[in-house]
């Protein structure tokens, strides 16, 4: 079952450098809507995975390494939510 737009957009916007809710709403109605929804779903999955990782911090992992992984993965989720990886997104311009 497809998630509602409200559910897909239910996240902490303070973690994002460049959030534009109006732009997101337009994207959810535009030609790349299916891809953007997919990116939002992936970002939600990433959040859950990172939350799980933080909750079950393993003594086998170097804490600095784990912190770096979490920071990097959260950055990927942010780029997905900001539509930076959609066609014409800021990270794909010029590629």
Image (cartoon, rainbow, N blue to C red):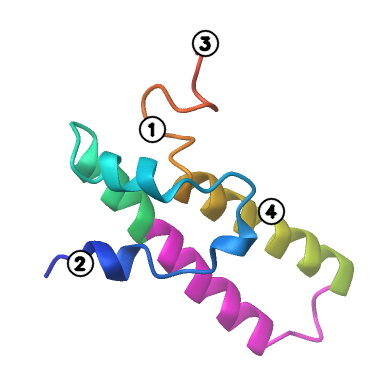
Relative to 67, 7 lies left or right: left
Instruction: Kindly identify the residue that appears in the image at 31 percent across and 44 percent down.
Output: 36
Q: CA distance from mark 4 to mark 1?
A: 19 Å
Tell me where the magenta segment starts and ends, as one range.
42-62
Q: Secondary structure at mark 2?
A: loop
Q: Does 50 appear in magenta?
A: yes
- Residue drawn 63% across the image and 61% down it: 15
- Indicate which disc, 3 or 4, sits on the residue closer to the N terminus: 4
Q: Residues within 10 Å of mark 1 (few under 14, many from 20)?
A: many
Tell me if residue 22 comes above or below residue 89 in the rendering: below
| Marks 2 and 3, how far apart at CA | 32 Å
- Point out the frontmost of discs 3 and 4: 3
Q: Earlier in the sequence, mark 4 or mark 1?
A: 4
- Residue 50 lies, in percent from the top left, at 59, 72
In the rendering, which numbered label is found on residue 27?
Answer: none
- Which residue is the site of mark 4? 72
Residue 10, above or below 43: below
Q: Identify the residue under disc 2.
A: 4
Marks 3/4: CA distance?
Answer: 23 Å
Marks 3,4: beta carbons within 8 A? no
Gap between marks 3 and 1, in whole Å?
13 Å
Who is closer to the viewer here, 28 or 38?
Answer: 28
Q: Quadrant of residue 26?
A: top left
If you read the primary sequence from the N terminus, does the residue marked by circle 2 or circle 3 appear first? 2
Q: Quadrant of the N terminus?
A: bottom left
Instruction: Pick whichever of labels 4 and 2 is earlier in the sequence.
Output: 2
> Which label was assigned to residue 94?
3
On the rendered structure, is 64 left or right of 4? right
Question: Most prominent secondary structure in the magenta stretch?
Answer: helix
Q: Nearer the viewer, residue 70 or 88?
A: 88
Alpha carbon distance from label 2 to label 1:
20 Å
Residue identified by numbered label 1: 86
């Amino acid at each position: 079952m497809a998630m509602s737009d409200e559910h897909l957009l239910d996240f902490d916007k303070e973690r994002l450098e460049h959030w534009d809710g109006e732009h997101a709403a337009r994207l959810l109605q535009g030609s790349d809507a299916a891809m953007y929804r997919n990116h939002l779903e992936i970002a939600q999955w990433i959040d859950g995975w990172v939350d799980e990782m933080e909750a079950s911090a393993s003594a086998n992992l170097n804490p600095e390494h784990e912190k770096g992984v979490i920071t990097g993965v959260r950055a990927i989720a942010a780029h997905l939510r900001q539509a930076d990886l959609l066609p014409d997104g800021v990270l794909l311009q010029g590629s």
